[in-house]
Image (cartoon, grey):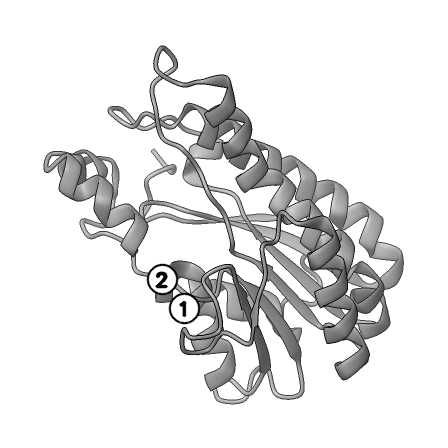
Amino acid sequence: MADRLAGRIAVVTGAASGIGQGCARIFASEGATVIGIDKAGTENSGIDHCCDLLDEGATNALFARIGQEHGRIDVLVNAAAFAVFEWIEAMTLADWRRTLSGELDIVFIATRAAWPWLKASGSASVINFASANARHALEGSPALAHCAGKGGVLAMTRQLAMEGAAYNIRANTIAPGFVQTAATRRHLEADPAFADRVLAKNMLKRLGEPEDIAWCATWLASAESRYVTGADFAVDGGATAW
């Protein structure tokens, strides 16, 4: 189907790379007006606004400008995130806090800033990203803070679904398994055996791509999922199904 998102105003954070970039590209191909935000800057293709989403004042001002220009926000994709991967004995409190800020605060600040404009939509969809790590540990992955952060996103999104229901704002999470991005390729390069551990856990013996996640996000952004809120969708090659 084409034009599944025709007429929809979609804001995608973390749109310069990875899952955010995949969502922005497919949303645009399905007819959405996409506003891409990233800390990386507007020199990246598809990025409309450069913003540090952990800067509360800058984020509030940016979403106010977007809302005033378009009158509403129909879809908010919170793909921007940052995490430090380290074992507990080596994890510093500063890196722990940095990760929770990069996994949780970044979603809260942007969603709160977008909320008045999501209410103005009358049929808005908030799409957050949990992780397979929100439910399952992966052997050999030093993801302590990341697991905590993504578990928090999962719980926060259920609460957003309840708070948004009165305004027909739906909120759901996608829980990706291992997805190949510029960031995750560094893990593969650092530990050549890591891919084998991931594939051993997957039912489908391949690694994920950003588009695999973006197609699920497209459905959640569309009217096709109008009766779906407070849900979590595992897109992980079957890794958490056994």
* Residue at x 23%, y 40% (from the top left corner): 187
The type of residue carrying mark 2 is Pro
Q: State the mark number for residue 22.
A: 1
User: Vertical placement of 227 versus 240: above or below?
Assistant: below
Label 1 crowd bin: few (<14), some (14–19), many (20+), radius 10 Å:
many
User: Vertical placement of 128 versus 15: above or below?
Assistant: above
Q: Residue 199 placed where, x, y %?
A: 19, 41
The type of residue carrying mark 1 is Gly
Tell me how many marks there are: 2
Q: Which residue is mark 2?
A: 210
Q: Residue 188 placed where, x, y %?
A: 18, 42
* Viewer-closest of 68 and 184: 68
User: Vertical placement of 89 versus 142: above or below?
Assistant: above
* Residue at x 36%, y 10% (from the top left corner): 89
View extreme (left): residue? 192
Q: Residue 97 placed where, x, y %?
A: 55, 27
* Residue at x 73%, y 72% (from the top left corner): 73
Image position of 135 (left or right of 184)? right
Q: State the mark number for residue 176.
A: none
> Which element is circle 2 on?
helix
* Viewer-closest of 200 and 86: 86
Is residue 180 among what the camera can see? no
Image position of 96 (left or right of 172)? left
Is residue 33 among what the camera can see? yes
* Residue at x 16%, y 37% (from the top left corner): 190
Quadrant where the C terminus is found in the figure: top left
Of mark 1 and mark 2, the one earlier in the sequence is 1
Whether the residues at callouts 1 and 2 have beta carbons within 8 Å, the answer is yes
Label 2 crowd bin: few (<14), some (14–19), many (20+), radius 10 Å:
some
